[in-house]
């Protein structure tokens, strides 16, 4: 029997494509000990939602007052402002009239309010909770920090895949043609390209759907059962 493995950093309320990987993979490894990006934006602390009819960033500020490098599971959110309250106010003002606001917000509100300051722990808790609400098996989620490896870059992805008994690797679209593909082949691991197409869905306040937003947007508009059906029917 083959085993399909996906690997991804624990993102902040990720988009539908992230949950499609969880849905499809036999094992989904949360890359919680990758080096954190020191400057610029990161999917670990921001994502786009619909604000005033446009896709705009929803951000949880992180504490960058450190020297050298840190891993994702060593990063903490900033304690200088009530960003959780700001995020909730933004969601309420943007989605309170969305068809499934009450259902979605009842699950999302405690996730946003989670007092854990650790970026990885906060995001993993939210990801697991939302995946479970969608009916995806959360026991298929593992952490890279629990799977000691000695390599880096592509070789580490290969090592992690093998460490959980994987023989196929689920990679995002657009990665074909790179030299790393050969490394997987030489290691005896088949590549499966996700080819995820962001699905359009009825979106409150818009005639034309803005795709690629956080799963929060889809949940507000469709609810959990609606999102589950959307993923199953649209992407096979």
Image (cartoon, rainbow, N blue to C red):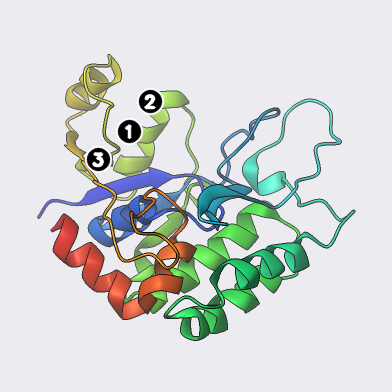
Q: Which residue is mark 3?
A: 169
Circle 1 crowding by C-alpha within 10 Å: few under 14, some 14–19, many from 20: many
Residue sitting at x 42%, y 53% = 15
Question: Residue 177 versus residue 87: which sits nearer the camera?
Answer: 87
Is residue 11 among what the camera can see? no
Q: Nearer the viewer, mark 1 or mark 3?
A: 3
Across and down, in percent, residue 163 comes to: 35, 45
Between the C-alphas of marks 1 and 2, the distance is: 6 Å
Residue sitting at x 87%, y 57% = 81
Q: Which residue is situated farthest in the right direction here?
A: 80
Circle 3 crowding by C-alpha within 10 Å: few under 14, some 14–19, many from 20: many
* 107 relative to 146, above or below: below
* 125 relative to 37, above or below: below
Badge 2 marks a residue whose secondary structure is helix
Q: Which residue is mark 2?
A: 154
Numbered circle sitting on residue 158:
1
Across and down, in percent, residue 71 comes to: 65, 38
* 102 relative to 16, above or below: below
Asked if the residue at tag 2 contacts the one at tag 1, i.e. Cβ–Cβ closer than 8 Å, the answer is yes
| Left or right: residue 96 compared with residue 134 | right
| Left or right: residue 104 compared with residue 134 | right
Q: Which residue is situated farthest in the left direction here?
A: 1
Is residue 81 among what the camera can see? yes
Circle 2 crowding by C-alpha within 10 Å: few under 14, some 14–19, many from 20: some
């Amino acid at each position: 029997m083959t085993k399909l493995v996906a690997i991804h950093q624990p993102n902040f309320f990720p988009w539908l494509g992230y949950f499609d990987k969880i849905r499809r993979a036999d094992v989904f490894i949360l890359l919680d000990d990758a080096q954190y990006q020191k400057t610029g934006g990161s999917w670990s602390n921001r994502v786009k939602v619909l604000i005033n009819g446009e896709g705009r960033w929803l951000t949880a500020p992180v504490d960058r007052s450190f020297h050298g490098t840190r891993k994702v599971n060593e990063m903490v959110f900033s304690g200088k402002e009530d960003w959780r309250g700001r995020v909730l106010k933004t969601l309420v003002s943007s989605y309170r009239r969305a068809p499934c606001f009450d259902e979605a917000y009842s699950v999302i509100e405690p996730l946003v309010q989670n007092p854990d300051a650790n970026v990885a722990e906060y995001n993993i808790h939210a990801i697991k909770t939302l995946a479970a609400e969608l009916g995806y098996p959360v026991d298929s989620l593992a952490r890279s920090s629990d799977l000691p490896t000695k390599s880096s870059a592509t070789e580490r992805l290969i090592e992690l895949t093998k460490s959980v008994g994987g023989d196929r690797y689920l990679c995002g679209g657009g990665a074909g043609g790179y030299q790393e593909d050969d490394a997987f082949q030489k290691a005896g691991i088949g590549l499966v390209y996700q080819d995820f197409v962001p699905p359009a869905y009825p979106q409150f306040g818009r005639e034309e759907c803005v795709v690629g937003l956080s799963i929060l947007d889809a949940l507000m508009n469709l609810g959990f059962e609606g999102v589950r059906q959307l993923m199953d029917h649209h992407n096979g």
